[in-house]
Structures are given as C-alpha cells and as structure tokens.
Image (spheres, rainbow, N blue to C red):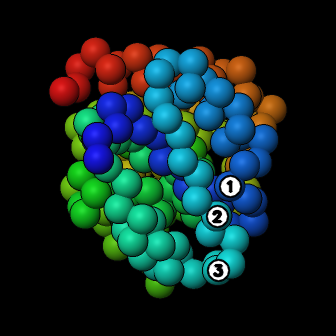
C-alpha cells in the first residue's frame, strides 16, 4: 500500500458533526492544495478521551499529516500529537484546559496555528492564547464567536496559507 502524500484529518466539536459548515469549507481549501481529507464522526460520544482513542485507532498516516480540530476536536487533535506525530496542527477555538481534561498536550509539532474568536463564550480566548504561548504557535484572533462560522473566508485564507507552509517547509 502506498503512503498518502498529503492528508488533513479533521476533528469536529462536541455538538457538531464531521461535515459541518466549517469543516466542509476548509476541506475544499485542503483539496484545492492537493491534500486528501478525512473527517471521522465522533458524535456517538461526548467524552473527549474516547474521541482521542477513536482517532488513535484510525492511525492516519501520510508523508505530510495535518491534524485540524475545532473546539473539543481541538483537544482531540492536540492530544493525538504525541502518538500520531503530525507534521502540522491547526486548531480553531480549541477546548483545552477544562477541569477533568486539562492535561498539557505533548508532541505538538513546530508548525502549529491557533485561531480563536474574541467573543467566544464557550472556550475563553485566553485558553487558545495559553496553548499558543506554551507551544510557540501562531495565534490569530478574529472578531467572532466560538463557531467562527461568520469568518469562513478568513479561515480559508489562514488555512490555505498554513497548508502552503506545510508543503514548502516539511518533508
């Protein structure tokens, strides 16, 4: 079996699904840049650790593996880094540092970006800032809420630039 060249693996949030508005939009961006996409369905559980275990069981691999997570999916993607060893990590309003699932992610790749909304009333923007600071990640703060759905064009630009960086800097 041939190893996939470029793969983006999305992890959706607690209340959304694998092909919601944001993931569908960003998947188009990824495909347009030569990446295959995968978006597992985690909606059968609200337990973030079960979601991490599901992603690890899928064991996605590629020459260039990019994990992308939104909200609880941000936690899932970040926590999977130690095992999956992606080349890059892109998080949107990552649900990190909540009581009971507040461990610091390990193995975060050097190429890492966080996008958060100033008006996020679900995951405080300070959590995205904390993660970005701890991991020397690029941080983008948009004039938006938790869903970031009113910023799809900006997200696509940021994500497209991020994927361009993945393709030019890593291999």
Other-residue count near label 3 (Cα within 10 Å), few / some / many at <14 / 14–19 / ≥20: few
Q: Are marks 3 and 2 in contact (CB under 8 Å)?
A: no
- Where does the image place residue 39, in percent across and percent down from the top left? 59, 52
> In the rendered view, does 14 fall on the left or right side of 30?
right
User: Could you tell me which secondary element the residue under label 2 belongs to?
Assistant: loop
Q: How many marks?
A: 3
Where 44 falls versus 138 (above or below)? below
Query: Residue 142 lies in what quarter of the image?
Result: top right
Which quadrant of the view contains residue 106? bottom left
Is 34 situated above or below 21? Answer: above
Few, some or many C-alpha atoms within 10 Å of disc 1 (few <14, some 14-19, many ≥20)? some
Q: Which numbered circle lies on residue 41?
A: 2
Query: What is the distance, in whole Å, between disc 1 and disc 3 at their CAs?
Result: 13 Å
Q: In the rendered image of this protein, does residue 74 appear above or below residue 15?
A: above
* 1 and 3 marks in contact (CB < 8 Å): no
| 35 sits to left or right of 157 | left
Q: Is residue 167 visible?
A: yes
* The furthest residue to the left: 171
Q: CA distance from mark 1 to mark 2?
A: 5 Å
Q: Which residue is mark 1?
A: 18
Camera sees residue 136: no
- Give the number of the disc on residue 45: 3
Of callouts 1 and 3, the N-terminal one: 1
10 vs 74, nearest the viewer: 10
Q: Nearer the viewer, residue 59 or 78?
A: 59
Q: Residue at x 47, y 73 (%)?
A: 54
Percent position of residue 25, x then y: 71, 32
Instruction: Kindly identify the residue that appears in the image at 24 percent across and 52 percent down.
Output: 85
Circle 2 packing at 10 Å, graded few (<14), some (14-19), many (20+), is some
What kind of element bears circle 1? loop
Image position, residue 58 (x, y; %): 42, 65
């Amino acid at each position: 079996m041939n190893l996939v060249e470029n793969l983006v693996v999305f992890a959706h949030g607690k209340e959304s699904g694998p092909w919601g508005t944001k993931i569908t939009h960003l998947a188009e961006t990824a495909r347009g840049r030569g990446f295959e996409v995968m978006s597992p369905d985690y909606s059968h559980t609200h337990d973030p650790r079960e979601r991490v275990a599901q992603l690890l069981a899928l064991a996605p691999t590629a020459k260039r593996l990019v994990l992308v997570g939104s909200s609880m999916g941000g936690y899932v993607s970040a926590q999977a880094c130690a095992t999956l060893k992606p080349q890059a990590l892109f998080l949107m309003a990552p649900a990190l540092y909540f009581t009971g699932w507040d461990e610091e992610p390990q193995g975060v790749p050097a190429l890492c970006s966080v996008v958060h909304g100033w008006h996020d009333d679900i995951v405080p923007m300070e959590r995205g800032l904390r993660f970005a600071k701890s991991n020397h990640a690029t941080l983008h703060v948009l004039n938006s809420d938790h869903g970031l759905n009113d910023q799809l064009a900006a997200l696509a630009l940021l994500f497209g630039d991020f994927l361009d960086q993945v393709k030019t800097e890593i291999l």
